[in-house]
Image: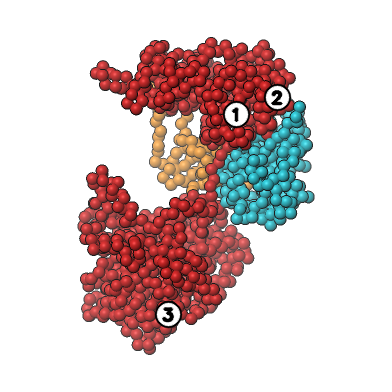
Chain colours: A cyan, B orange, C red
Amino acid sequence: MTIPFLTSPAEGVWLSHGATIVQTAAGWRVPESFAGESTELRAAREAVALGDDTPRGKIRVQGDEADALIGAALGAPPAAVGRVVRVGTVEITRLRMDLCHVGMTAEDREAVWAALCETRGALPVTITDVTHGRFEFRLVGPAAPLLLSKVCGIDFHASVFADGQARETSVAKTRQLVIRADLGGLPAYRLLGGRALGAYMWETLMEAGRDLGVEAIGTGALLTLAG
Amino acid sequence: MLRLECPNCGVRNTSEFRYGGEQNPRPTPSTEVADADWIRYLYERRNVMGVQIEWWYHRAGCGIWFLVERDRRSNIVARTWRWQPDGAAAAEGSHSP
Amino acid sequence: MSGRRLPAQTGESLDRGQPLEFRFDGHSYQGFAGDTVASALTAAGVNVVSRSFKYHRPRGLLCCAGHCPNCLVQIGDEPSVRSCKRALEAGMDVQPQNAWPSLDNDLLSLTEAASRFMPVGFYYKTFHRPRLLWPAFEHVLRNAAGLGVIDENTPEGDYDKQYLHADVVVVGGGPAGVSAAVAAVDEGARVLLIDENPELGGHLRYSRPDAVAHARIVDGQQRLLQSGGTILNDTAVVGWYEDHWLSAVRGNRLFKIRAGAVVVASGAFETPSVFAGNDHPGIMLGTAVQRLLHLYGVVPGHRAVVVTANDTGWAVAADLLAAGVNVAAVADERPQLPVGTDIEALQAAGVTLLPGSTIAAARGKSGVEEVTLVAVDGSSGSHVVRCDFVALSTTWVPSAELAYMAGARSCYDDELAEMRLDNLPDGLFLAGRVAGPCSAEQEWLQGARAGAAAAGNTDDLPIAASQDVQATARSSALVAAPDVGGDKRFVCLCEDVTDVDIETAIAEGFDRIELLKRYSTVGMGPCQGRMCGLNGIRLCAQGTGKSVQDTGRTTGRPPVTPVALGVLAGQKMEPVQLSAVHDWHVDQGARMMVAGLWMRPEHYGDAAAEVRAMRQTVGLIDVSPLGKLQLTGPGVAAMLERLYVNNWQDLRRGRVRYGIMCNDEGVVLDDGVCARLSDEQWYVSTTSTGASGALEWMEWWRQSGWGDGVHITDLTETHAAFNLAGPQSRALLQTQTDRDLSNDRFPYMRARRADVAGVPCLLLRIGFTGELGYEIHCPAGYGRYLWQRLIDAGADFGLRPFGVEAQRVLRLEKAHFIVGQDTDALTDPISADAAWAVHLDKDCDFLGRRALTRIATDGPRQRLVGFRTGRRADSLLEGLQIVQSDDRGKPQIIGWVSSCRFSPTLQETIGLCWLPAALAERSEATFHIHVDGRLEPARVHHGPFYDAEGARLRG
Ligand SMILES: [Zn+2]
């Protein structure tokens, strides 16, 4: 039997940006590079770059006891609404008093899932793997806040939306979770939205960033940035 | 554009929200309510010129339904809060920093 | 050359080393980099720039500040460009507007000869009746009116939008604005300073050069930028909306700005006075002359007359004199000549100075050639003075549109003859000339005070202008010049409205300022009342005997200045939802259709073949857009009982049931199947287009008291979903999974988890299409892979993918309704032939119970029922009406067709329709569908058209 492969919703539009596609160990097809690592890194360091992190694990934990469960299973309870707590590579973002988004690398997903499910016991908490339900894009670079200000009405100024903060809001007329998660000393954001909107969002962000010199950035250059 | 304070997310542009109409509790049990009360519930809206308690839904944000006390003459919002089972006014909702 | 270009001026914006060629009205000209189109035209000796809107009179520059309609031109394919604001570029092709066939020889100017036939309210009176002729009138009006030409071949421009946020937004970059911005930033505020010009400085840019003041601006700009402030040049703030939400435009970009507080430091502008022939080219505002002189080193002529009522005009006259222009006369409305160095210089040069005088008439052919100056009180005789341009410095109007939009009131200051503002809303502050006349030092002080107040650190205490400032800055109190006969006296240049038109309108009863505006169209043109607003109000006051204050002003609304439609449209941003298999559908040549935000394959070329393949072998359709909700918790069954008309408590694990959701009016909102995966985990599907509405509806009930112990998770996009259906579907699917799919182990209306082609899936054995079938739900990331595996495996089974069109036919053959297609906002499930799903005997008070109980008792009046025709009837379409003759033989509408298709399976046209209950109950009863005046017969059919027993589904 062939090994199942997994696709990001933006795969079709990456190809129009000249992506080189490779398959990860977990089976996800990802864009390793676009215009070449040096061009991509220059855009990320001097302007803004858009990458695709869709394979990242995304788990939704809902219930009044979500805090207790996450604290026990992952070693740190969530912080206030709109704040991110990082435990190793796991990011816990509180969306509501009774709802958290837990993000992690694709490799860690199964372990985190297992930890949460084992700890739940009889707690009235719903744990749902929504990895496949959301695209996850990465905007990196000094011009990233400026690009976002062209498609989103909330304030991206560092004084009110700093690293480690998150907002659920309207981006390009769609509902998204925006997490500021800086990368390699550069301002960076995660954008998570409905998977079916992924191609639309990719194209809209590239278009909005055109005058800022936006480049698509591959997984190779993203790794380099993360150092 | 007006702004509205989501009890969960804080102040946002009203374009992030869906209006849900004036608060209109459902009389129960429906089969035993007097006709006049049932008709009032189904079809009659108070449409006050003054302070109204109304529903809003944070569609582009956290997805909660909440109540807003708004003066329809001035658009001044006195408070916003999540519905509570006992019907009592909840304390101000906690929200983001 | 016309000799109008002066030697280099201090502070001019020109780069004289860079000449630029351009064309205007077919002729070639030359200007410099730094010129505007208008300044270059003026330097080239062009006086007439446009023709007026109604009478097609020649018009020249008036304000040079982007307010008036006179300088509107067409540049390339862009109509209605303000040439006084547009920077000159090499090779520009500039065309005059409203001129046909040419600017010099405009045939429509003949309309002026007929102007007595075009009275005020002309459009209302003339084109009102008869209504039948309106199309003809419209054609005439479209040709005669309108500004510029739209080129339909113009490519889409790059327009976009940006959101900005600031604690304090300062509008206006003159001394008061810069001072306010610096003060606010010093208080720690995030400051955004917006100015419509390419550089800061406001009136300092074009008034007589002042090195000290200029240095203060430069210093303020540096301090602002060093402290993290932002400056937007070339940006016009065009609207104020609630909660200090501002719109501003720069080039092709629209800014939407949320401000904590706003400082309006937008200054004031001059407006023309009313006298005979006051629209002749060459008659312009004093500040326009100053701009041309100091910014562009251009004079608009060689022999000037200056008319003033305050000290501004004397500065203009002295500047002209210093620039070598022959100043023929200066008329000042004030009875005493003021004292000062400007006057001394003019006196020394022997210029005729006329106190207590003003202009009453101007004459000329294509431009002003002579003017009549008279005593304001009519006491002495008149002077006729030859000149080739006139500078008018008589009346100031505060540039206060934003403050008015924000709710400020105007109050007329009779002493100053100027509008002042009061009743400012919270968080809005005025600084500088917009708040009234003030000295140079007061501008800085007011700005600093307003900036600090806007930053929240002091109370704004207005600094009153001193008496001496008021005396030198007051506007003309004359409503109009003494009438000496002669040419028309224009009030509104945009719409060619005269003082006589205003008087006539008032006499006809339009004596309120808002009515007067609408009837006479005064103030309704491109200047939006900037040039004519105050004169209109004063004339209205005079005509009605009211005070100017009591006359009031018309409501100001955004935009302050005209905005291109492209700017409002912005970047293309239309969300579209694509399934994981979208690219495959497109590659296979599917015809895609829009369904809500989703793109779906309508068919892959031959919908009828897709229907046949599915009935005979097996078909596969992408149903990923289906709404998919996960409900978890101990309270789910109880909640579903209340939201749906069906029973749920008795649904056992691993089972699926069709459900209908109604509101309390008994109206069908949505339908779908619910699977109980475990005691506390349910999987609920909704219609594709109703998914978000259903979620919000459920969430509302959950969050307002019916959701104890229930969590809802939207999995619509988390799962791709495919429906594999047809007699061969089991055999095909069995090749891809180890789970036993036999009818015993996996019967109809059951849910099972299974690995399919190595992908974890949820399988629902349901059958919207009426054949054996499986709805396969898998994690969306696997969607593309799994689809391909099923297609590949299906090759041996005759599998054919099918689209939405085939699905519509297939479900119609089973007489299943589609919510929103066969039902509307009044449809209840009992009338829609789904009474079997309604359980009025439930022991909970579910939504719709009361209404449905009543309908069940009274019986429905209309019913949804199937019909067949026994033939192929392609003329039958959805939406057609069903008619029946009444007792007197008159046809009456008794129903309508909600679904209709030719069935490839049955080889006849079938459908669903709404009929009176009595008729619908009679199987085989004949009725008639009205098609283009014909009556097409059809027969009532009960139950599914195909496999009525459902044996194929269950087998
Ligand atoms: Zn919210």
Side of C383 where B3 appears, left or right: right
Circle 1 sits in a helix, a strand or a loop, which is it?
strand
What's the residue type where badge 2 is placed?
Val
Task: Indicate which disc, 3 or 1, sits on the residue closer to the N terminus.
Answer: 3
Q: Identify the residue at image location x=53%, y=49%.
A: C571
Q: Nearer the viewer, mark 2 or mark 3?
A: 3
Q: Work out whether residue A105 or residue A25 is closer to the camera in this orientation and state it.
A: A25
Q: In the image, residue A89 lies at what x, y percent? A: 76, 42
Q: In the image, residue B14 lies at what x, y percent? A: 51, 44
Q: Is residue C381 above or below residue A44?
A: below
Bin the neighbour count of mark 2 within 10 Å (Cα to Cα): few under 14, some 14-19, many 20 and up. Answer: many
Q: CA distance from mark 2 to mark 3?
A: 87 Å
Q: Is the CB–ligand 1 distance for label 3 below 8 Å? A: no
Establish whether labels 2 and 1 are both on one chain: yes
Q: In the image, residue C802 lies at what x, y percent? A: 57, 26
Q: Which mark is residue C756?
A: 2
Side of C524 where C906 appears, left or right: right
